[in-house]
Amino acid sequence: MPERAPWRAPAGVLASARRITDDLMDGLSGTRVRRAAHALRRLFGVPGLGISDLSGSLAWSGRPAADEAVAHVLDEVLHSEEPAARGGLAAVPLHVHDELAGALVLLGERGEVLRQAADLVVQALERGRLEASADQAAQAELRALRAEMSPHFVYNALTVIASLVRSEPDRARELMLDFADYTRYSLARHGEYTVVAEEFRAVETYLALQRAVLGERLKVQVRVAPEVLAVAVPYLVLEPLVENAIRHGIEPRSGTGLVQVHGQAEGNDCVITVEDDGVGMAPKRAADILAGHTTESGLGMANVDRRLRNVYGAWYGLTVETEVGAGTRVVVRVPRFQPGVLP
């Protein structure tokens, strides 16, 4: 019977590499490193394989190896950062971004197989670190967006509620519940994704508070098609756009202003528009805000656009139509169905 080749078909290699990357997401001291060792041993068809972190803690898979030999090669590799061999074992250091992360030990194999296995582990660790860094960056952006809640709006909303406590207690109670819902959704800990229905509910709560603050100066129209209510979107993508429309479009103008928020399906896409008939702005200024090239208020719009493009790709995100004195229209476009994007 012919000897079994150590490498599988390309599709199997890619699937195994992805599983190994997932198992090493938390590094060489994570809880799934032993499962990664098992997958590596099977992938390369070696009798025994171990992965060690910097402390020398070894996750082993396969035929047992002599403890003394294992301890020797690990100690030599982790201190010298050079390959070592003893008693049928071969070990190499694992460097991630030029830093020693641990060591890989093989039983009965050296040379090319050892190098290939080490390369795969290093690539898995590097990808895990990059994905962790990207997730941390996204969470930092979301925290920044939450922290941008306008103190001016909070003060005005609470002042209006307080003024109604005696004259219209039922109305004051209703607005206080709206304010509680608004702060819960804006500041509480959420998952990475929600659904369009929840985003529109948050928008309606925010607009109810703003109408109480601005009175007859603000008119609103909210309309969303049923077929997009269950579309999954990154959390907190609509409220910042509505807030921008009021703060920078309606409040600076005289007289009554209108804010419209509409959501509908266009083929395989979900399209949401946030439009105001406020003061507008120069298109160049809008482009700078959207690209994050200015420090003026607009973090919310740039943050939303960046997060949408990171999730869905460059074809999606925000587009802005505006002109001085002609209001502003912001269009949000996302796919109605996207693998991996679940509320």
Image (tube, helix red, strand yellow):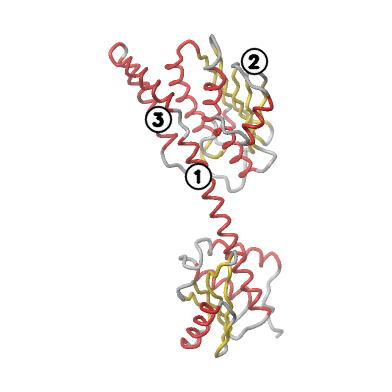
The three-letter code of the residue at mark 1 reads: Ala
Q: Which residue is mark 2?
A: 325
**Residue farthest left in this picture:** 166
Measuring 48% from the left and 74% from the top, which residue is drawn there?
59
Amino acid type shown at disc 3: Asp
Q: Earlier in the sequence, mark 1 or mark 3?
A: 1
Query: Which residue type carries mark 2?
Result: Gly
* Label 1 crowd (10 A; few <14 / some 14-19 / many >=20): few
Q: Mark 3 sits on what residue?
A: 181
Query: Residue 181 appears in which quarter of the rendering?
Result: top left
Residue 276: quarter of image: top right
Q: Earlier in the sequence, mark 2 or mark 1?
A: 1
Judging depth in this view, the residue of 279 and 193 nearest the camera is 279
- Locate residue 317, reporting x and y percent: 64, 36
Note whether 209 is above or below 313 in the view shown.
above
Q: Quick one: 12 or 2, which is closer to the camera?
A: 12
- Above or below, 172 against 295 in this view is above
- Residue 168 — which label? none
Instruction: Give how far apart the Cα atoms at labels 1 and 3 are.
Output: 23 Å
Q: Pointer 1: what residue?
A: 140
Residue 270 seen: no
Residue 20, image x, y percentages: 57, 65
Residue at position x 68%, y 25% in the image: 283
Nearer-N-terminus badge (3/2) = 3
